[in-house]
Amino acid sequence: MFAAILVNFAIPALTRSTSFDALMISCVYSDLHKICVWFFFAIFLTLMFLGMSAAEAPFVLASKLFTALYFVYFLAVLPALN
């Protein structure tokens, strides 16, 4: 749980751009980035649903999978888009 918050502080270190303005301009105008943000939003909503579900067999496996996808977005996809 703490890692999900801590990974947000690592975002500036994971990007290649030197200024915040260049980062925002490249993010706003990239269609691929927009698609990835919507996938991240879907992952987030799925994790919310799985968090309120019972800790049973299919939900536990799905929670592990979507948690891994959550961190893959921050540690692999986001740096690759910049």
Image: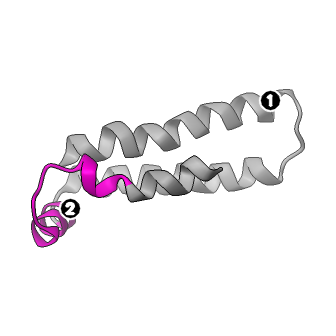
Residue 77, x across and y down, in percent: 32, 41
Question: Which residue appears at 21% of the width and 50% of the height?
Answer: 15
Between discs 2 and 1, the one toward the N terminus: 2
Question: Which residue in the structure is indicated by mark 1?
Answer: 58
Instruction: Identify the disc placed on residue 27.
Output: 2
Residue 5 falls left or right of residue 19: right
* Quadrant of res 62: top right
Q: Residue at x 51, y 44 (%)?
A: 70
Describe residue 10's horizontal placement relative to residue 29 as left or right. Answer: right
Using the image, determine if residue 47 lies above or below residue 55: below
Along the line of sight, the residue nearer the viewer: 50 or 16: 16
Element at label 1 = helix
Q: Amino acid at mark 1?
A: Pro
- Residue drawn at point x = 49 percent, y = 57 percent: 41
Region in magenta: 10-28
Circle 2: residue type? Cys
**Which residue occupies 21% across, 55% down?**
31
| Residue 18 image offset from top left, x and y in percent | 9, 60
Residue 18 against residue 24 in the figure, above or below: above
